[in-house]
Image (cartoon, helix red, strand yellow):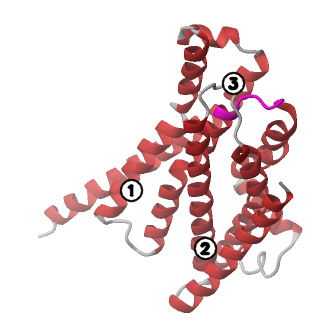
Amino acid sequence: MLSALVCGALVFPGLFCSSRKVLKSTFTQWSDADVVCVSERLVSAIHASLATAAGVTVMTSCRDVMADSHWLVNAFVLFGVPYMVFDIYAMYLSHYHTQKLKGHSSSYSGHSLQTVKAFLIKDSMLVLHHMALLLIFMPITLFFRRGLGDFFIGCLFTTEFSTPFVSIGKILIQLGLDNTRLHRINGIIVLLSFFTCRILLFPFMYWMYGRQFGIPLHRVVFHLPLQCNVGNLVLLAPQIYWFILLLRKANRLYLRQRKGPARRLKTP
């Protein structure tokens, strides 16, 4: 299992550094903020794709949702630990260069506790999400499950399915393609995949548990330990929050595109 940890520590920073070099030489007009942002998104999309593939493999291999086990669960958790640490650093770099580009040269002339604090305040939810995965989800998965519930860990891996599409949306904006049909189609896929794999996934897991033990869906919650229900609620709450933000962003984009044709029609 140590090899999975070492592999993750080499793969994700290596991909990030390689991506920065390639993008810097390919898009010479891009700023450091552009290069770092797109590189971080590319690595995020790769990790999410691997997580989804691992999750589907585990889910389709476990017939008994509680007792069946799969070696990929612990291996991928350890493989993903370096990514979570790295991604916090990559998000900070993206924040730093973006703020510097916006003209905050006095505050962002160099890395400092002030720049780190500003990043932690701005992206507090994402940092908290990563820290929760590192300090809570990882220890529970590796040490406290007693080898049970690999199927449900696989389900949680698949929550990353929407992440590549979110990253594609950011990259399309970076390339100036935010007013294209491709960007609109990708936005619809983001909403559908996010809702399916990050929100509907939770009632699906309850349904699979009830199916295994012959319990109606509406009664499953009363057959599970309190800590399981609380844990699922803690995981679900930020997903609902982020989905609401996505809906608001989609609505703003829709209204902006409607106003565009209206202005053109009024122009003499």
- The answer to which quarter of the image holds residue 108 is bottom right
Residue 192's spot in the image, x, y percent? Answer: 41, 42
Say whether residue 150 is magenta: yes
Query: Relative to 58, is 98 above or below?
Result: below
Q: Which of 143 and 134 is in front in this view?
A: 143
Query: Relative to 51, is 67 above or below?
Result: above
Q: How far apart are marks 2 and 1 (CA)?
A: 19 Å
Q: Which contiguous range is marked in magenta?
A: 145-151
Q: Which of 172 and 105 is in front in this view?
A: 172
What residue would you read off at disc 1? 186
Q: Does any portion of residue 200 appear in the rendered image? A: yes
Q: Does any portion of residue 127 appear in the rendered image? A: no
What residue would you read off at disc 3? 66
Task: Say what secondary structure mark 2 lies in.
Answer: helix
Circle 2: residue type: Ser
> Do residues under tags 2 and 3 come within 8 Å of each other at their CB atoms?
no
Q: In which quarter of the image is the N terminus?
A: bottom right
Q: In terms of sequence position, does the residue under pointer 2 or pointer 1 come before the other?
A: 2
Circle 3: residue type: Met
For discs 2 and 3, the disc positioned in front in the rendered view:
3
